[in-house]
Amino acid sequence: MAERTKTRRMTSFQKVLQRLAKDKMAVLCGIILLAFLLVAIFSSSLTPNDPNEVHPELRLAEPSFQYPLGNDQLGRCILSRLIAGTSTTLGNALAVLTGILVVGVPLGMYAGFKGGIVDNIIMRLVDVLCTFPSSLVALAVVGILGPGLTNIMLVLVTLWWAPLARMVRGEVLQIKEKEFVTAARCSGLSDTKIVFRHVLLNIVPPVVVYATLRVGAIIMHIAGFSFIGLGTQAPMSDWGVMLSDAREYLRFAPRMMLWPGLCIMIVAFSLNVFGEGLGEALKPGSKNLSRKEVQE
């Protein structure tokens, strides 16, 4: 029985991949995202030069064999800083996303499945947090605690778990009324087993899509605050910091702003397109997974 259930899960996964493969644009964006992720993971091995090494004699130098994208205002290798910035930017965005998922998913599931006074308390807290604009709150926190990426990340996690919890709660409210959940209750399964075997399995697709789309917004916020000097601090490599350094030299060396700007635009666009394609691929195949397990 366990082998048949595992086989059916694999079959469903293969069907999702087949549906996703039909969306050529989503596949292309997925490949681009994978390439950026690999660059972020192996950034220390891919940088041709030390990203923080200063060469005053090469200030604003044109691209060369040793420095393929040229040098910045301090003579640092732009390509090396771009690669190192990929690791910093994506790593920080994934850290924020992890915090949002760790807080939002359990609270949303508990509120939707248990209901009652706990549901009311969590949802009222969600309503309050959703009224705060994240950018203004981040500016206020930075004004009190001082500039720093950690403060920005904490603000994003504190405010952005709420929309996820609301979405998860709505999904759970629909799922717990399904026939396969009723069948699981009648078979004597505890609430904990029902949640982990059936409810959690069915909220994975919308959560994955939500997370994919949310990463783009996180990257834009982190880069934006780094651009105005409130996020990542020099000399660390970050796409937002690189944009901030380049704005004074836009007329003389536009390439300094071109490359980090392109990276932000490509990653954000790819995340949105891939997230939408993944959502469409998951929709048809995510409805009856738990019902099949109950029938087994």
Image: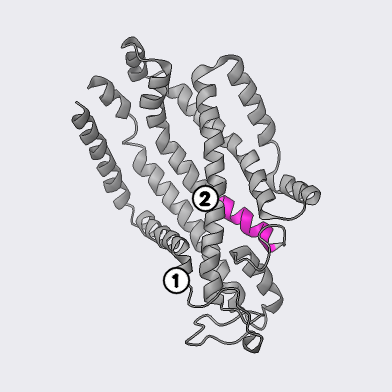
* Point 33% across, 57% down: residue: 24
Point 67% across, 60% down: residue: 226
Q: Is residue 218 magenta?
A: yes
Q: How many marks?
A: 2
Camera-side residue: 293 or 58? 58
Q: Residues within 10 Å of mark 2 (few under 14, many from 20)?
A: some
Q: Position of residue 295 (x, y in %)?
A: 24, 20
Indicate which disc, 2 or 1, sits on the residue closer to the N terminus: 1
Left or right of 96? Residue 278 is: left
Q: Nearer the viewer, mark 2 or mark 1?
A: 1
Residue at which label 2 appears: 94
Q: Which residue is mark 1?
A: 46
Stretch in magenta: 216-227
What percent of the width, then of the height, locates residue 283? 36, 37
At horizontal 52% and vertical 80% (from top left) the residue drawn is: 69
**Left or right position of 279 against 249:** left
Q: CA distance from mark 2 to mark 1?
A: 21 Å
What amino acid type should be assigned to the residue bearing mark 2?
Answer: Leu
